[in-house]
Amino acid sequence: MPTVSVKRDLLFRALDKEYTDEEFDELCFEFGLELDEITSEKDIILREQGDVKAEGASDVVLYKIDVPANRYDLLCLEGLVRGLQVFKEKIDAPHYRRVPASSGEPQRLIITEETVAVRPHAVAAVLRNITFTPERYESFIELQEKLHQNVCRKRTLVAIGTHDLDTLVGPFTYTAKPPGDILFRPLNQSREFTATELMSLYKTDSHLRHYLHIIEDEPVFPVIYDSNGVVLSMPPIINGDHSKISLNTKNVFIECTATDLTKAKIVLDMVVTMFSEYCEEPFTPRPICLRSEDAESIARLLTRMCLRSEVQGDRIHVEIPPTRSDIIHACDIVEDAAIAYGFNNIVRTTPRTYTIGNQLPMNKLTELLRMDLAAAGFTEALTFALCSQEDIADKLGHNIAEMKAVHIANPKTAEFQVARTTLLPGLLKTVAANRKMPLPLKLFEISDVVLKDETKDVGARNNRRLCAVYYNKSPGFEVIHGLLDRVMQLLDVKPGKREGYHIQAADDATYFPGRCAEIFAHGMSIGHLGVLHPDIISRFELTMPCSALDVDIEPFL
């Protein structure tokens, strides 16, 4: 959970009320927050850096408050105070609305096609006639940093730039150029640098060096110009010094460049709405409808959570302000109503419906089989649900294009490219990692594999399977066959072609020719058993024969 540090006295002044530490802790709890720590800047430095560094540090009391990860509107003093004031019904929920530019023509941000290669999205807004004080200015900068570390994922998804609009001339152009063609004076520097020189300069900067990797290997770098060719920023690294904001800034141009357009809009909404209270005009909300029985009381509860609500017939009309990007479904609104009502105020009652919780039949069957397989001398393994394409295809003698495998869109490593379609690779890799253990190695796993299924709403389904391997100096086909017979005995399935189970010879690239059998139960194919092909064994870096059993257990429920 993100932690927000606010000065206690400044917070109480904004709330227009003095609280004891215990009272404020209780208020936070009621609102769904947690007062994590009461400290000061001096105490923090003393604890982290020692007495010498702490000399002269501020003794102002700080409240460190944990806020939910999806409540970006509470990451600054303004949003926190606004939320608490509305919750305590001391002020009305703000009504945001967008206003036209005073000149009649809105500012324009032109996005060129060159940005597609590096950071394709950008959104922008203007805060007009804003009044900064030192406290407000500090909070404005801190909010941007909090957003960068949270929803912006350290600027990889979104980067925020704020500029003094009065020093610029629109329209603005967001484009991408080779680093050698970008020349400007960056923030707090005395001369101009090319983008290439800046990348070298900031490699030793304790703050900015962490963001260089985002674009340093790209052939072009993103850059924003005004109509006079003045560089506003080179996102996501640094702003230009020409348009830097100060306490005297009256009109702020805010731009957010991004790889994720939704996140960019959320971030822009947060910055604008948090500080629009210091301007003459705010933004507009988004309306949705929610059915309700006790409409009037729920409307009042939702209004306390900054969700302006009014009853319209048999429905409640709820305005979702830009600050509440966490409201996605009707259940999110119900949760806010419950918070406003107070979970401690919900009367404990006996449910009208008599129900008894029970284990899912599939999980119960799985647990029973696990116990008996262990009793049969096999050791259970638990392997990763994700694996490489090579593990389930090439190493097993199959073609990945012919498999019903679910692929990961953006795998972080070659080891986790697809969801497994069989448990066998995981067990063979486990055997390979334990080759020095005494022989024989007898392993099993009962877990889910994932298969494509167009009939499902998500396009895939889980399938519970049992897989076992026997690794020794001899293949041990009889051991695996005996295990199959034991499993069928436990499932009360008798040998037989019609109502029972039987095996018949089959060809499968994973198994040695003439040493593979397909397993049938109740007239349907449920798996294979046999001796693994020597090529398969060597691909998993094994040197001795190995037999395997792979069975679908879902038909036995």
Image (cartoon, rainbow, N blue to C red):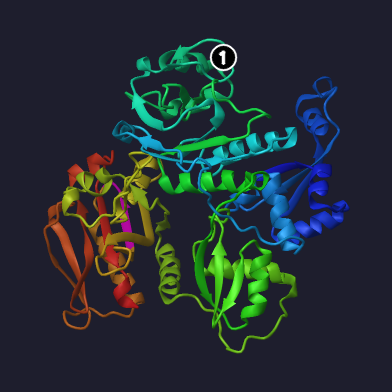
Displayed quadrant of residue 231: top left
Magenta residues (range): 466-473
* Residue beneath the point at 29% across and 54% down: 406
Predominant secondary structure in magenta? strand
In this view, the residue farthest toward the front is 103
Of 233 and 219, the residue lying toward us: 233
For residue 530, above or below residue 357: above
Residue located beneath label 1 in the image: 189
Can residue 330 be seen at all in this image of the molecule? Answer: yes
* Residue beneath the point at 41% across and 45% down: 261
Can residue 164 be seen at all in this image of the molecule? Answer: no
What secondary structure is marked by label 1?
Answer: loop
Q: Is residue 533 magenta?
A: no
Residue 418: x percent and y percent? Answer: 31, 49
Left or right, residue 163 beside residue 375: right
Displayed quadrant of residue 556: bottom left
| Label 1 crowd bin: few (<14), some (14–19), many (20+), radius 10 Å | few
Of 20 and 381, the residue lying toward us: 20
For residue 112, above or below residue 503: above
Residue 504: x percent and y percent? Answer: 13, 68
For badge 1, the amino acid type reads: Gln
Q: Is residue 471 magenta?
A: yes
Residue 289: x percent and y percent? Answer: 50, 72
Left or right, residue 554 beside residue 106: left
Residue 129: x percent and y percent? Answer: 63, 39
Of 461 and 250, the residue lying toward us: 250
* Residue beneath the point at 60% across and 36% down: 145
In this view, the residue farthest toward the top is 191
Left or right, residue 177 beside residue 33: left
